[in-house]
Image (cartoon, rainbow, N blue to C red):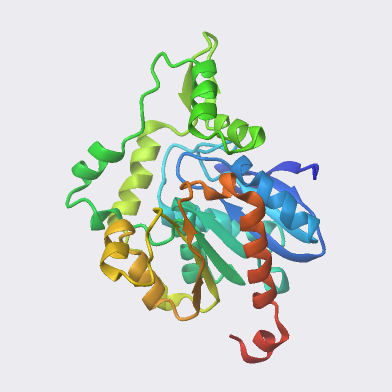
Amino acid sequence: MTSVFEVERVQVSAELRLAVRRLRGPRRPFLLVHGLASNARLWDGVAQHLAAAGHETVAVDLRGHGESDAPAARYDTATAAADVHELCRRMNLTGNRRPIAVGQSWGGNVVLTLAARHGGAAGLVLVDGGWLHLADRFPTFDDCWAALAPPQFDGVRFDDVRRHLAEMHPDWSPEARDAVLGNFRILEDGTVRARLERDHHRSILFSLWSENPRDLYPLVDVPVFVIPAIPPNFDPATDDEQLIEAKPGLYDALNMLADVDVRWYVGADHDLHAQYPERLAADLLAFATRVDSPERDATGR
């Protein structure tokens, strides 16, 4: 199954064009949002399965990521959500065409903010993210940055990155591993540099540390599907304390969101959309059926 993506750059403000990868279809659109220091191509496998079922898909590179522009400032979750809201307006993903917004990792926090602050989603899917509040793990931002600052990649060769990905993710498709390579620029000497500038990465981490998604849960009035990757041999249904320790913030998301369902991916990678594109797409299609059910249209829930 191979689909040809329409690749375009959409002007969302005077300073910013966002790159998107689009597959057209007559059914409810899906908006696919990547995580921190990632890019839209990691959604390609999922998008192809969704498009085969008739759904339009729009995967976006957030500001400073992938092929999108990189303005000098404003790297935080709220701004990313506002960017995506404007993108939806300009691509006519509004009204009856409001998308099911799917976000992975930091992208989950972005689409949560999109739904809560802008009403920009018909349904919400949080893929191993959306509940991230780094202050739950780190008492100060200095602690956070010391633990989560990205590698410098000084002198690292592109071929070595490719080989490392193959060793780390042998169960991923070659296309998914190649998508990760889109997170880097290749320099003339064959070494790599991260596309997301280091200070921009730091600013986004600060927003994940300082902004608490718990403030947004009461504002979400659409169905939410939560898809966490959890460790093997872990039964979240019987051990709240272990869940709180393994996934800080997730327990509150499951208890504070008004209309929420969960699907556990046991033993999955954090980038489970790259690891299990067909399985994830099947779960998303089932969720779309729920979002668009006649019963929900009649009751609003």
The N terminus appears in which quarter of the rendering? top right
Instruction: Out of 187 and 51, give the one closest to the viewer.
Output: 51
Instruction: Out of 188 and 285, give the one closest to the viewer.
Output: 285
Residue 285 drawn above or below residue 177: below
Residue 12 drawn above or below residue 171: below
Going 49% across and 18% down the picture, which residue do you hit? Answer: 160
Q: Residue furthest bottom?
A: 299
Q: Quadrant of residue 36?
A: top left
How far across and how far down the image is residue 143, in percent?
19, 43
Q: Is residue 13 visible?
A: no
How far across and how far down the image is residue 291, in percent?
65, 76
30 horizontally vs 146: left or right:
right
Instruction: Out of 115 and 224, give the one closest to the viewer.
Output: 224
Going 58% across and 44% down the picture, which residue do you hit? Answer: 274
Q: Residue furthest top?
A: 189
Q: Quadrant of residue 135?
A: bottom left
The C terminus appears in which quarter of the rendering? bottom right
Residue 225 drawn above or below residue 37: below
Instruction: Out of 173 and 155, give the one closest to the viewer.
Output: 173
